[in-house]
Image (cartoon, helix red, strand yellow):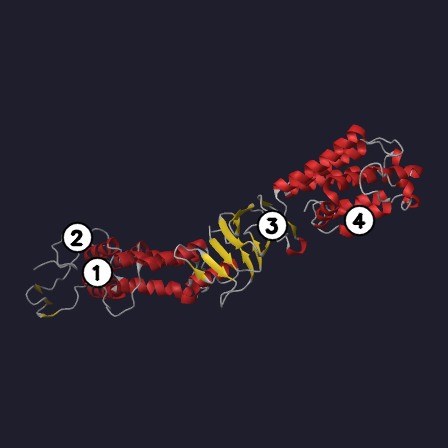
């Protein structure tokens, strides 16, 4: 009589769950010519002893047909069944065998050749989409971790040539994330960036064409933070939002495009579009004379972009004005020039700063010095006129440094913040009886030769949000 295991190999006597080999086990004689037990045509050789079943399960897990979790679960059932009666044990083993039927097949092949197949690439792509967060389970009965585990099992099954089981596991996860539409690259891109691309290149570059039939000339795109490459053509207006508000944004020119980089994502936008970047952390030397490029932490506070080099140039001009005051620019009534010079130097430092927080601090220092004019004993009471003279000198030197158009632009774009302009206007008009008098113009100190009121009106008329530091 021959001891039978699933592969009809010679094996040692069986042992029960406790390692006791005294258990009586019944074997039917196997007729190798007929392929039968007991002389009748036999089906698959179902393991009939604990040792045989353990070997059977071990072979399945080694071949990748069942998971380690499944192996441990079935092994527990086998160990418990070792103490059952022979009939009960064989019934339990038959039940286990039937449950494992999908994992079986001749030499590991599918037992359903007509079943849908799945490729390893499809399994890996879906797993990557889930792990990256691009695709998420919408079925409450499956978590992200469970989806990944199921796909890992599908990979093992696919490797073991059991594509029927692999396809079933793949479909289970696919349905849990919303079906085929959920993993369509165009739909994924639309969910990540906020608009569906017109096309996707083989290398993954996402393209938006404002003139395409399904395209739009007005785009509002957000950076996904996954090193995406995006090219925008024929757009009229484009708004770009970084994934995180603190992400550093750099911009440069490349042919007919602005190239914007945000935390690894790269956007190329046609230069003739009006481009707004929703961030305060923008840097890069680009030509923006036409004012098409704007930025700001919120759409309600956008302003024209000035490159660091342009800001430095404006800063140096204001600093030059401060140095003129230091050298030889006496006020009409001979009061100390130090206060006007100190205010101008702080304005120059704030103008050159690109970091929003540091910029806010520097403009705060300007505001503090302007406020001190109202508390210094030499600029209060009947001597308030000295306040307006110091303020007029500051105004004149900035006007002289930037020119009228440059001064207007700095005010309108918030380079000189609204609260600073309002504070300076207040100091200019603090003594009402001098506001309109030509005698208090300080015409000899550069500037346009305007009265205090005219200068204050220029500040308030051209000032725009945002407040200082933003």
- Residue 51 higher or lower than 438, as above or below: below
In the current view of this chain or complex, which residue is farthest to the top?
327
Q: Quadrant of the N terminus?
A: bottom left
Instruction: Give left or right: position of 280 versus 83.
Output: right
Q: Circle 3 is placed at which residue position? A: 279
Q: Count up the numbered dots.
A: 4
In the current view of this chain or complex, which residue is farthest to the left?
33
Q: Nearer the viewer, residue 61 or 175?
A: 175
Q: Circle 2 is placed at which residue position? A: 21
Residue 430 picture location, percent across and down: 88, 44
Identify the element where label 2 is drawn: loop
Q: Circle 1 is placed at which residue position? A: 108
Query: How far apart, in angstroms, are the residues tagged by discs 3 and 1?
Result: 57 Å
Query: How far apart, in angstroms, are the residues tagged by discs 4 and 1?
Result: 85 Å
Query: How far apart, in angstroms, are the residues tagged by discs 2 and 3?
Result: 76 Å
- Is residue 141 among what the camera can see? no
Query: How far apart, in angstroms, are the residues tagged by discs 1 and 2?
Result: 32 Å
Would you call the spot at circle 3 few (<14 residues within 10 Å), some (14-19), or many (20 or more)? many
Q: Nearer the viewer, mark 4 or mark 3?
A: 4
Q: Circle 4 is placed at which residue position? A: 458
Query: How far apart, in angstroms, are the residues tagged by discs 4 and 2?
Result: 104 Å
Residue 146 picture location, percent across and down: 40, 58
| Point 90% across, 39% down: residue | 385
- Is residue 457 among what the camera can see? yes
Residue 244 picture location, percent across and down: 56, 50
Q: Nearer the viewer, residue 283 or 36?
A: 283
Identify the element where label 4 is drawn: helix
Q: Nearer the viewer, mark 3 or mark 1?
A: 3
Query: How far apart, in angstroms, are the residues tagged by discs 4 and 3?
Result: 29 Å
Q: Nearer the viewer, residue 205 or 210?
A: 210
Q: Nearer the viewer, mark 4 or mark 2?
A: 4
Q: Are marks 4 and 2 in contact (CB under 8 Å)?
A: no
């Amino acid at each position: 009589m021959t001891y039978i295991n699933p592969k009809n190999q010679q094996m040692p006597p069986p042992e029960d769950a406790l390692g006791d080999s005294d258990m009586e086990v019944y074997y039917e004689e196997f007729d190798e010519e007929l392929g039968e037990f007991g002389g009748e045509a036999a089906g698959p050789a179902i393991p009939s002893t604990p040792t045989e079943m353990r070997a059977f399960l071990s072979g399945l897990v080694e071949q990748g047909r069942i998971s380690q979790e499944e192996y441990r679960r079935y092994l527990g059932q086998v160990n418990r069944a070792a103490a059952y009666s022979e009939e009960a044990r064989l019934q339990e083993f038959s039940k286990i065998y039937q449950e494992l039927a999908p994992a079986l097949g001749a030499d590991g092949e599918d037992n359903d050749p007509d079943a849908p197949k799945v490729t390893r690439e499809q399994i890996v792509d879906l797993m990557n989409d889930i792990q990256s967060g691009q695709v998420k389970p919408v079925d409450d009965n499956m978590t992200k971790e469970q989806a990944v585990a199921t796909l890992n099992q599908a990979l093992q099954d696919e490797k073991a040539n059991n594509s029927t089981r692999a396809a079933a596991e793949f479909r289970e996860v696919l349905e849990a994330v919303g079906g085929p539409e959920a993993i369509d690259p165009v739909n994924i891109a639309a969910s990540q960036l906020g608009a569906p691309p017109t096309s996707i290149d083989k290398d993954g570059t996402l393209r938006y064409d404002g003139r395409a039939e399904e395209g739009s000339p007005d785009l509002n795109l957000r950076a996904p933070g996954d090193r995406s490459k995006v090219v925008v053509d024929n757009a009229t207006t484009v708004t770009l939002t970084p994934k995180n508000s603190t992400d550093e944004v750099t911009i440069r020119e490349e042919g007919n495009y602005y190239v914007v980089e945000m935390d690894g994502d790269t956007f190329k936008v046609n230069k003739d579009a009006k481009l707004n970047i929703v961030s305060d952390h923008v840097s890069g030397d680009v030509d923006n004379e036409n004012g098409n490029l704007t930025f700001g932490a919120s759409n309600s506070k956008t302003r024209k972009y000035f490159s660091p080099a342009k800001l430095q140039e404006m800063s140096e001009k204001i600093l030059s004005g401060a140095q003129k005051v230091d050298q030889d620019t006496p006020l009409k009534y001979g009061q100390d020039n130090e206060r006007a010079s100190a205010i101008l130097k702080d304005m120059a430092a704030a103008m050159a700063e690109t970091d929003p927080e540091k910029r806010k601090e520097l403009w705060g220092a300007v505001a503090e010095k302007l406020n001190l004019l109202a508390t210094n004993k030499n600029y209060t009471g009947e001597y308030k006129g000295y306040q307006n003279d110091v303020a007029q000198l500051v105004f004149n030197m900035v006007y002289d440094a930037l020119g009228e158009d440059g001064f207007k632009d700095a005010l309108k774009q918030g380079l000189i913040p609204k609260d600073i302009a309002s504070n300076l206007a207040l100091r200019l008009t603090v003594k009402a009886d001098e506001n309109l008098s030509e005698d208090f113009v300080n015409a000899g100190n550069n500037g346009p030769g305007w009265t205090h009121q005219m200068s204050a009106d220029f500040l308030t008329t051209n000032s725009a949000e945002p407040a200082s530091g933003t």
